[in-house]
Image (cartoon, rainbow, N blue to C red):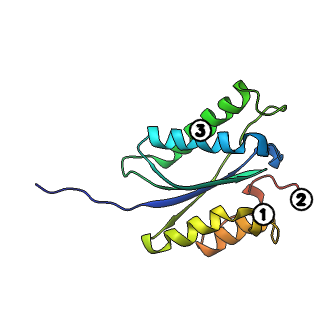
């Protein structure tokens, strides 16, 4: 009997609506744990997660049965509900439409994990927009500035 073997590593990046800095240190860890639970419940393997006040990076091993757009929809919807129902933000919390998803080989995992866990350091040198456009270019993804996240820098 044959089996199916896969190794699919995906980094997803998405922003808080209007790029508001709503992810506060007081609930950042709870939000990240909640998202980790969503991934676990959908049979995904979390590799790294880290958020800045206005965006989040999630790196995970993706199950081949998963439809990425549905998974991201669930993460965004469920985590927004979690923040709002628990009144973790004094403002209404929503994620922006859209996301970036980038695939990596197994040999790149450690570097991606290190990059995600050092977000504070990276953003002391470059903005989220600069970082995101760099990802798009590095992965040879055609884009139109008009359709990027709403950036208010």
Residue annotated with mark 2:
153
Quick one: label 3, few (<14), some, or many (20+) residues within 10 Å?
some
Contact flag, marks 3 and 2 (Cβ < 8 Å): no
Location of residue 50 in the rendering, given as x and y in whole percent from the top left corner:
65, 54
Of the numbered discs 2 and 1, the one sitting upstream in the chain is 1
Tell whether 114 sits left or right of 64. Answer: right
Query: Quadrant of residue 152 in the image?
Result: bottom right
Residue at left 84%, top 32%? 91
Return the residue found at the far right. 153
Q: Quadrant of the N terminus?
A: bottom left
- For the residues carrying marks 3 and 2, which lies nearer the camera in this image? 3
How far across and how far down the image is residue 139, in percent?
A: 58, 72
Q: Between 5 and 26, which is closer to the camera in this rendering?
A: 26
Identify which residue is drawn at 76% across, 27% down.
87
Q: Nearer the viewer, residue 137 or 36?
A: 36
Disc 2 to disc 1, C-alpha distance = 9 Å
Which is in the foreground here, disc 3 or disc 1? 3
Q: In the displayed orientation, state which residue is furthest to the top.
A: 85
CA distance for labels 3 and 2: 29 Å
Residue 23 in sight in this render: no
- Distance (Cα) linking label 3 and label 1: 26 Å
Which quarter of the rendered picture does the C terminus lie within? bottom right
Mark closest to the chain's N terminus, 3 or 2: 3
Residue located beneath label 3 in the image:
34
* Residue drawn 46% across the image and 42% down it: 40
- Secondary element at image label 1: helix
Are there few (<14), some (14-19), or many (20+) residues within 10 Å of tag 2?
few
State if disc 1 and disc 2 touch (CB < 8 Å).
yes
Give the residue at mark 1: 129
Q: Secondary structure at mark 2?
A: loop
């Amino acid at each position: 009997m044959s089996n199916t073997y896969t190794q699919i590593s995906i980094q997803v990046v998405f922003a808080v609506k209007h790029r508001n800095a709503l992810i506060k240190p007081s609930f950042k860890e709870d939000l990240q744990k909640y998202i980790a639970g969503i991934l676990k419940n959908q049979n995904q393997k979390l590799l790294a997660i880290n958020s800045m006040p206005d965006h989040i990076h999630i790196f995970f091993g993706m199950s081949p049965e998963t439809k990425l757009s549905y998974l991201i929809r669930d993460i965004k919807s469920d985590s927004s509900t979690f923040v709002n129902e628990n009144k973790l933000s004094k403002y209404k919390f929503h994620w922006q439409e859209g996301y970036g998803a980038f695939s990596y080989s197994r040999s790149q995992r450690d570097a991606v994990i290190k990059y995600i866990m050092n977000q504070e350091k990276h953003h002391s040198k470059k903005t989220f927009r600069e970082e995101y456009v760099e990802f798009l270019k590095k992965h040879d993804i055609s884009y139109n500035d008009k359709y990027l996240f709403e950036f208010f820098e």
